[in-house]
């Protein structure tokens, strides 16, 4: 309790959906594709899909859910690359459920 008296609470604003999209596109997707053994051009996510990826089930202040979703997409793409030899993937609203079954 004595330590709590010395601490000052800080309010940290959550990321906006626009910030999450930028983080997903510019940082998370390239990093996860590399970790998954995919080329930097292997996955293209259409613009209209990003809002569904960023906010799939409701509001999430951080980016953990976004990162998990991107990892699922990359794992599925890597699996299809190994099993069927496919090399490039365009994620659209039509095929999103194929890559992330929870939708």
Image: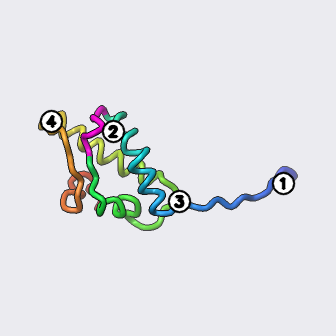
Magenta part of the chain: 37-43
* Label 3: which secondary element: loop
Between 90 and 103, the one nearer to me in the picture:
90
Would you identify the image quadrant in which residue 40 lies? Answer: top left
User: Mark 2 or mark 3, which is nearer the start of the sequence?
Assistant: 3
**Whole-number angstrom distance, CA of label 3 to CA of label 2:** 23 Å
Between 18 and 62, the one nearer to me in the picture:
18
User: Mark 1 or mark 2, which is nearer the start of the sequence?
Assistant: 1
- Residue position marked by numbered label 2 in the rendering: 33
Please report contact status of discs 1 and 3: CB closer than 8 Å, yes or no.
no
- Residue position marked by numbered label 3 in the rendering: 15
User: Mark 3 or mark 1, which is nearer the start of the sequence?
Assistant: 1
- Residue position marked by numbered label 1 in the rendering: 1
- Residue position marked by numbered label 4 in the rendering: 83
Residue 39 shown in magenta: yes
Question: Percent from the top left, x then y, of residue 55?
Answer: 40, 63
Q: Nearer the viewer, mark 1 or mark 3?
A: 3
Between 41 and 56, the one nearer to me in the picture:
41
The kind of secondary structure the magenta stretch mainly shows is loop
4 to the left or right of 41 = right
Would you identify the image quadrant in which residue 92 lies? Answer: bottom left
**Whole-number angstrom distance, CA of label 4 to CA of label 3:** 37 Å
* Label 1: which secondary element: loop
**Whole-number angstrom distance, CA of label 4 to CA of label 2:** 17 Å
């Amino acid at each position: 309790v004595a330590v709590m008296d010395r601490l000052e609470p800080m309010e940290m604003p959550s990321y906006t959906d626009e910030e999450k999209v930028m983080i997903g596109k510019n940082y998370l997707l390239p990093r996860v594709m590399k970790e998954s053994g995919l080329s930097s051009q292997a996955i293209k996510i259409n613009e209209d899909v990003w809002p569904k990826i960023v906010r799939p089930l409701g509001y999430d202040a951080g980016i953990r859910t976004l990162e998990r979703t991107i990892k699922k997409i990359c794992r599925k793409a890597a699996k299809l690359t190994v099993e069927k030899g496919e090399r490039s993937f365009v994620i659209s609203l039509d095929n999103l459920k194929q890559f992330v079954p929870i939708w």
